[in-house]
Image (cartoon, grey):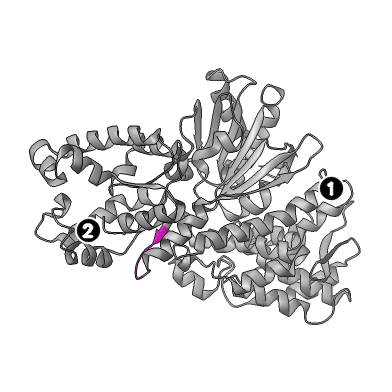
Amino acid sequence: MGTGKTTVGQQLARKLGREFVDTDLVIEERHGPVHEIFESQGESAFRDIERALAEELGVRKGLVIATGGRMLLDPENFRALSKNGRIFCLVATPEEIYDRVTGDPARVNRPLLEVADPKQRIIELLGERGPDYERFPQLTTDQIEPDVIAEELADLWSGHDTYPIASPSGGYEFTVGAGILPFLHQLASIHGPVALITDDVVHDLYGHSLGDTDLTITLPAGRHQKTVDSVQVVYNRLLDAGIDRSATIVSLGTSIIGDIAGFTAATYLRGVELVHCPTNLIAMIDTSIGGKVGLDTAQGRNLIGLYKQPKAVLADVATLQTLPDRDFYSGMAEVIKHGLIASSFLLDHIKETDWRNSTRLSPGALANLQYLVAQAIQIKIAIVQEDPYEESGRRTVLNLGHTFAYAIEHATAGEWNHGEAVAVGLVASARLSELTGHAASGLADLVESFVAHVGLSTRIPDGIPPRALIEAMHKDKKRLGGQLRFVLLRDVGDPFVADDISESQVLEVLEGMYRSGSAGSPGITGEIAAHTA
C-alpha cells in the first residue's frame, strides 16, 4: 500500500493507450468498501474475492492493473496474472508509505492499519512481505515523480533483447529482459514436459515465476554440489518420475546449477533439450553461453565435462536485484574481462553508468543492467561462434585472468570466490603482459583502475606463498603438455595466448601483487565489504 501503484498505473496506461484497472476499486464497486468486507466477512473472504478477480483479469489483454499490496503474494493470483502480463513491484520506505497513507484524505479506511501504531504496523508488514516482494522486478518510488516511474515501466514493458547464437548442433536464442521468467514457455518455445533443476535458495525466490512444471528437482546451494553424485541424484528423480525424451530440462540458478543441468540433459536418455535461466551475473554473461559443461572432482574443478548447447537462454535481469552484494560485484569481474577482450565501449559503460547495487531499485537501474548484460553477452557470443569447440584457439582468450584466478581460488580454499579471483587475475595478466614486453607501460594501471572502480581487490592477500600459487597453476586443466598457458593483452581488444612464459616471470608478477590482510580475506574493497556487512 502507498507505493504509488494507482497513480503510476494510471499514467502508464495513458502512455501505452491501455485500460487501467485498480483491483481494490473493482472490488469496492462490486462488493462494497474493503474495510466493510474485512469487518463483516473477514480477511479470508476478501482474499477469495481477490482470487476470483485475478482469474477474471488474467484472461484479458490490453490492461494495466494495479493490485492490492498482498494480492500477488498468493501463488494462484500470480499464475493467473502472469499468463498474459509482466509483473513489477513498486516499493517505498516505511516513512514514505506512512506519510502517503495518512496525509491524503482520500486514502482512508485501511483495515490493516487500524491499529494503535500504524507506522509500526507498516514496518511489520514490510518485514513479513519483504522476502516475497523481492521475487518481482522492483522499482523504488521514494521522492521520485510518478511520471518518471511510469516512463521506466513503459521502457521495460516495451520488450526484451534477443540475440541469435549459431552452433554446429543448431542455433538458439539468448533473450535478456526484466520480468521475463513467467514467459519461459513462449520465449523458449517449450511444448512438452518440463523438468526444472534449481537450488533451494533460488527456488524459494523464483521457482514460482516459471509457472507449473512437471517435475522440480531442488538441490542444496553451493559449489560442493557440482559433482557426479549430484547428477546421479537428478537421474534418479527423472527416472522415478518417468520423464522421457520429449521433456525439456530447465536450469534456474547459478553456473553450478547450469553445469549440473547441462551434464544431465546431455546424457539422460542419450540427450534431451535444455534451457538455461541464469540468475546471477557470471552465469548470464559467461557460463550459460557456448555449451561448455563441467563437473568437479576431488582432484580439481571442471575436470569432467562435455559440450551441450541449450535450446534457449533466458536472462531475467530482475533476478540480479536479489543477488547478494558480494556475488553481484564479483560478477562485474567477468564483465570487465569481456570489455578487455573486445570492447573499450563496454569498459566506458562500466565507468559512466550508474549500475551499482545501491541503485538497483532506482529509475533506469533495470534498463542499465539489461544493457550491461546485453553488451557483455554479444562479446562472448561472437567468440564462441568462431570457435564452438575450442579447436582454433580463439575461444581460449575467454580465459583471460583465469590461470591466476584458479590458483587463488585453490590457495584460499574457496574463501575467495571466482569473480574476486578473476579480478586479481586480470590485473596480474596485464602486469605479466607488460613484464614480457607485449604491452606498453600503463595497461596494468588501466586494468587495475577498472577493477578498483567496481569495488574489487587488485591485490593478493598476504599469507599465500607465491610457490603455492605456482603449484596450483600446474593443476589447472588449461595447461598444455605440462606448460602453463596464459592469456595476455597487447592492448584493450587485443588478447592472445602465450605458452612461453617462465615461472620466474610469473613469480615476479605475483611477488609484486601482495597486500596486507589474511589469506582468507574476500577480494572486495573495504567500501564494498562495509556495504555487504
Residue 241 percent location from the top left of the image: 52, 20
Residue 356 percent location from the top left of the image: 52, 68
Per the image, label 1 sits on a secondary structure element best described as loop
Residue at the spot of label 2: 122
Kindly identify which numbered label has been placed on residue 478: none
**Residue 150 vertical placement versus 432 (above, below):** above
Q: Do the residues labelled 1 and 2 touch (CB within 8 Å)?
A: no
Per the image, label 2 sits on a secondary structure element best described as helix
Taking the spot 49% from the left edge, 65% from the top edge, the residue there is 357
Say if the magenta span includes residue 133: no
123 or 265: nearer the viewer:
123
Task: Provide the residue span drawn in magenta.
Answer: 139-143
Taking the spot 28% from the left edge, 46% from the top edge, the residue there is 70
441 or 460: nearer the viewer:
441
Magenta-colored segment: predominant secondary structure: loop
Few, some or many C-alpha atoms within 10 Å of disc 2 (few <14, some 14-19, many ≥20)? some
Give the amino acid at mark 1: Asp
| Quadrant the C terminus occupies | bottom left
Query: Is residue 495 at all visible to an observer of this figure?
Result: yes
Residue at the spot of label 1: 387
- State how far apart marks 1 and 2 are (Cα): 55 Å
Residue 51 percent location from the top left of the image: 29, 34
**Residue 203 vertical placement versus 213 (above, below):** below
Quarter where residue 186 is shown: top right
Give the amino acid at mark 2: Ile
In the image: residue 409, left or right of residue 23 = right
